[in-house]
Amino acid sequence: MTVDATVVQSALAKARRRLIPFLFLLYIVAYLDRINVGFAALQMNQALGFSAATYGFGAGIFFLGYTLFEIPSNVILARVGARLWIARIMITWGIVSASMMFVRSASEFYTLRFLLGLAEAGFFPGIIFYLTRWFPARERARTIAAFMTATMIAGVIGGPVSGALLTFHGAGGLAGWQWLFLLEGLPAVVLGVVVLAVLTERPEDARWLTNAERVALVASLAADESGDHRQADVWSALRRPRTWLLAAVYFTIPVPLFGIGFWLPQMLKTASGGSDFQVGLLSAIPYAAGAIAMVIVGKHSDRTGERRWHVVMSALFSALALAASTAGTGAVWSVCTLSLAMAGLVSMFGPFWALATSSMAGVGAAASIALVNSVGNTGGFVGPYLLGAINERTHSFATGLLAIAALQAACGALVLLVRDDA
């Protein structure tokens, strides 16, 4: 069947306008619920007597729960549909996130963070898998980058909003950090219900496309999958060496992302000596830089069709900026160098996920995406805990930042080993 490229592009443009802003909003809420503990810690740690190591372990244990249920969750999503399963994920994680306001001890902190990871497991890889059902491989780097700028916008919005919520301290008999968890957790529950009403499962179900657009887009996606993609069952996909190498590469990304994300407010508090609200404003700057860089690099990767070197150069740039952040002091130096580090770090996401989804289709793709994300996200446990443990011993973030800079450099070397035929 001959596919009219103009009609396909019209369908993709409509899909982008219809799906990406909504998924973008969902991911903002998800990411905010994941990292808001970093802002809560400005008050919570002292109020509950948490040490740096206790906080770092609790922040990171989220990813152990996340990893445990990641593959089963994404396989379920592939079988029951994204609409139903993403709604379930959002409602349960919103309830658990809001329940963080009741934490009174380290054990309760660990338990709820672990349960939050269980509840959210499958959300991000589920969205990535969902996007493969709508966008052919040649369109994915910029599409995924556009979606994932939500992580950065969550940081831009979340910093000032979280800082402002901390000023509610004492209102209604609640501490500021309790208000933060409550008011940032409830939107996920509401949006989970909205997902059931508005998310379109597949192009075949899209009434907002013309019949010609539906037919052309479905044919284009079928042709894309019949090329280099492999239809595989779950176990075949999970045994593939390429999948495990991609997981190893991805491990090196969440270590600095969440190491910085969970500790950024405290780093900037130390560097600036500002109020909680001022720290919230300063913390928005690195995320804004990341959002801009992510979109630019994603578009360039799609335009050139090149993936690996876009990841390599972004990783090395981030590593150099992280190392530079340890060479000076003060708010200006910290904000500038950490902004550059964040820009390089998140620029990897678009080309990386375009590479990771380029040679697999079907339920095997759902399983392999989940494996890459789950193994990789154990780095989300390592990063916060590593920085917390080192900071407690040295009373400085410098050594921890140098350690994750070295890991970023390793990422650049590993990705060059990825081959499509492995």
Image (tube, helix red, strand yellow):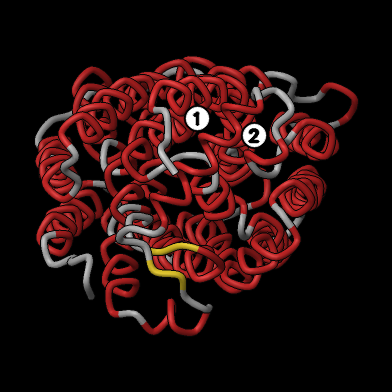
Give percent across and percent down for residue 200: 71, 37
Residue that lies at the very extreme toward the front in this rendered image? 1
Mark 2 is on which residue type?
A: Leu
* Kind of residue indicated by mark 1: Ala
- Residue 48: percent from left, percent from top: 67, 50
Give the number of the disc on residue 26: 2
State the residue in front, 238 or 101. Answer: 238
| Relative horizontal placement of residue 81, taking residue 367 as reference (left or right) | right
**Left or right, 57 with reference to 106:** left
The residue located at (46%, 28%) in the rendering is 8
Query: Is disc 2 in contact with disc 1, using a CB cutoff of under 8 Å?
Result: yes
Kindly identify which residue carries mark 1: 150
Picture layout, residue 208 above or below residue 140 = above
Furthest residue to the right? 172
Locate residue 311 relative to residue 45 in the image: left or right: left
Q: Give the mark, 2 or 1, whose residue is nearer the N terminus.
A: 2
The answer to whether residue 237 is left or right of residue 198 is left
